[in-house]
Image: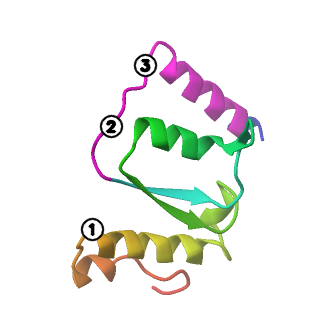
Amino acid sequence: MRYFWQLLYAFKQALRGQRLQPYGGAVAAFLAEDPYFHNGADARELLLERYMPRAQLFRVAGTHMGCLRPPHVTSLAEAVRGALRQAGAGESVLQKVATPGEP
């Protein structure tokens, strides 16, 4: 848990003095099911709408960190494959996104 707080502190220090600017390019955003609510709305979606209006949202199972581990990592891998397909990635790229548990 100490590492988490050190990471959060470093993140806040890096952002200090920075001003977010909207980005108009295409973005694939992978959001864990567990939302962070702010005034009844998912704060992550509010940020994406404001700063990345062209973002395509992909919902994945688990929490922010839990989606990186079994059993939820399978949901993330499927979402990444879907985003790559929609972006026009070829089969050679899609094959590199291995299913968890496969070599």
Q: Nearer the viewer, residue 34 or 67?
A: 34
- Three-letter residue code for mark 3: Arg
Query: From the image, which quarter does the C terminus lie in?
Result: bottom left
Percent from the top left, x then y, of residue 1? 78, 41
Give the crowd class for mark 2: few <14, some 14-19, many >=20 residues within 10 Å: some
Q: Nearer the viewer, residue 46 or 31?
A: 46
Which mark, residue 23? 2
Q: Report if the CB atoms under discs 3 and 1 are less than 8 Å apart.
A: no
Instruction: Return the residue at label 1.
Output: 87
- Three-letter residue code for mark 1: Ala
Question: What's the magenta region?
Answer: 4-26
Q: Indicate left or right for 74 with 35 as reference.
A: left
Q: Indicate left or right for 97 with 43 as reference.
A: left
Whole-number angstrom distance, CA of label 2 to CA of label 1: 18 Å
Percent from the top left, x then y, of residue 61? 65, 69
Give the crowd class for mark 1: few <14, some 14-19, many >=20 residues within 10 Å: few
Percent from the top left, x then y, of residue 90? 21, 79
Q: Is residue 91 above or below residue 38?
A: below
| Number of marks drawn | 3
